[in-house]
Image (spheres, rainbow, N blue to C red):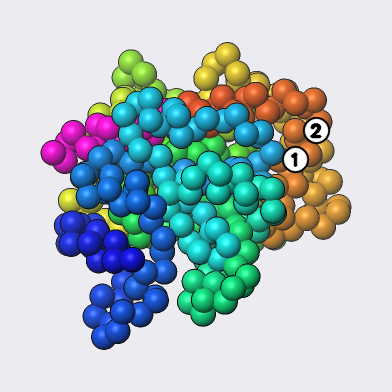
Amino acid sequence: KHHHHLHHRLLSPSSRPFTTNQHHPHNSPLTSLLKISPEITAALAAHKPLVALESTIYTHGALGNDLNLEAIVRSHGAVPAVCGILAGVPTVGLTPDEVERMVREGAKKASRRDLAYLSARAAVLGEQGGGQHAGTTIAGTMVLARLAGIRVFGTGGLGGVHRDGENSMDVSADLTELGRTRVAVVSSGCKGFLDIPRTLEFLETQGAFVATFAGGGKKGVDFPAFWARESGVPSPATVGDEREAAAIILAQERLGIESGLLFANPIPEEFAIPRKEMEVVIETAVREAAEKGFTGNANTPYVLGKIRELTQGRSVPANKALVRANVARAAKIAVELAKLMD
Ligand code: PSU
Ligand code: MN
């Protein structure tokens, strides 16, 4: 019940959660709104490397239940923390059973704007049955991870500026979150059906650091496009290895810069689907979404589902492979970061 306080003492001033009501006179339920699992609480106290994982990938991804992301994190010596809203309670450290329950019973999609709304009835008012499940998006997961004090997050592909976004103004809240919340996200760039040049422009405006992993000190690599390693758009920066990434994260923290960081990890070569090949499918999926009125937060799940259908399942193994590779990278970064902070 008091884990939040306990944990709070352990954080250095610069890494304190940005919203607490520690001066609240009562032991208000608000103080303990965020539920952090016992395993994560212990890992935080012991300064173990931690990797946040999103739950939208499970609730809206239809990637099956054999992703084994937690096992990947553990195999690299880090602790996985799946974030989401379980029966109206924002939770860091969902168990596989809890995630399975969310998928089975149905879940909303929660970005930053949705967190308070979905938590109010169950977590604040204590209403029985007042709580819905929700998978947290990258933005939603970043908020929860930051509140818990988790610095690294591994996932699939970032949301971004949608095609025709200059008219629809459909710009994922993932981008503004990276502008305001200091969590390092490891993804295969942004989803390939987005407007990648505008997505990068927007991230620059938001003050979010963007670098792409490039081995052997290679310079001038593309910012990756999810299923494809190439996008035709050069990455603003490159990073050589996990230790360098960890050092950048630590420098950001020591400088007191609150914005997030994006480390793009191109899909493993053997699973990549060339950009030209994907483009045909993407155009169809994006057009259909527009014709059928899938706008707002329904757009991304629809487009991804349509692409799955049109590629006869070829995009699914690619999607799984890239998520797994990103989560492994994230775990290695978290381990390096723990070493640097020792
Ligand atoms: N993976 C899926 N479906 C999704 C997403 C991931 O299979 O909907 C989510 C990610 O969590 C990402 C979000 O953060 O899509 C972006 O959605 P939007 O464009 O509505 O911000
Ligand atoms: Mn959107």
Residue at x 75% of width, y 33% of height:
308
Q: Which residue is mark 2?
A: 309
Relative depth, front residue between 216 and 46: 46
> Is 313 drawn above or below residue 99 in the view shown?
above
Q: Nearer the viewer, residue 132 or 241?
A: 132
Residue 174 in magenta? no
Answer whether residue 218 is visible to the viewer in this image. Answer: yes
Residues drawn in magenta:
327-342
Image quarter (top left, top right, bottom left or bottom right) of the N terminus: bottom left
> Could you tell me residue 242's position as x and y percent?
30, 28
Q: Residue furthest right?
A: 291
Mark 2 and mark 1 residues within 8 Å of each other at the beta carbon: yes
Disc 1 within 8 angstroms of ligand 1 (CB) = no
Q: Secondary structure at mark 1?
A: helix
Left or right of residue 156, residue 181 in this image: left
Q: Residue furthest bottom?
A: 25
Q: Is residue 330 magenta?
A: yes
The percent position of residue 162, horizontal first and vertical second, equals 65, 50
Residue 205: x %, y % from top left: 43, 55
Residue found at x 56% / y 44%? 97
The answer to whether residue 232 is seen in the rendering is: no
Q: Which mark is residue 305?
A: 1
**Which secondary structure type mostly characterizes the magenta part of the structure?**
helix
- Residue 129 picture quarter: bottom right
Q: Is residue 20 left or right of residue 186?
A: left
Amino acid at pointer 1? Gly
> How many numbered discs?
2
Q: Say few, some or many: other residues with alpha carbon within 10 Å of mark 2 (under 14 / 14 to 19 / 20 or more).
A: some
Residue occupying the far front of the picture: 128
User: What's the distance in space between the residues labelled 2 and 1, CA to CA?
Assistant: 6 Å
Could you say which quadrant of the image residue 81 lies in?
top left
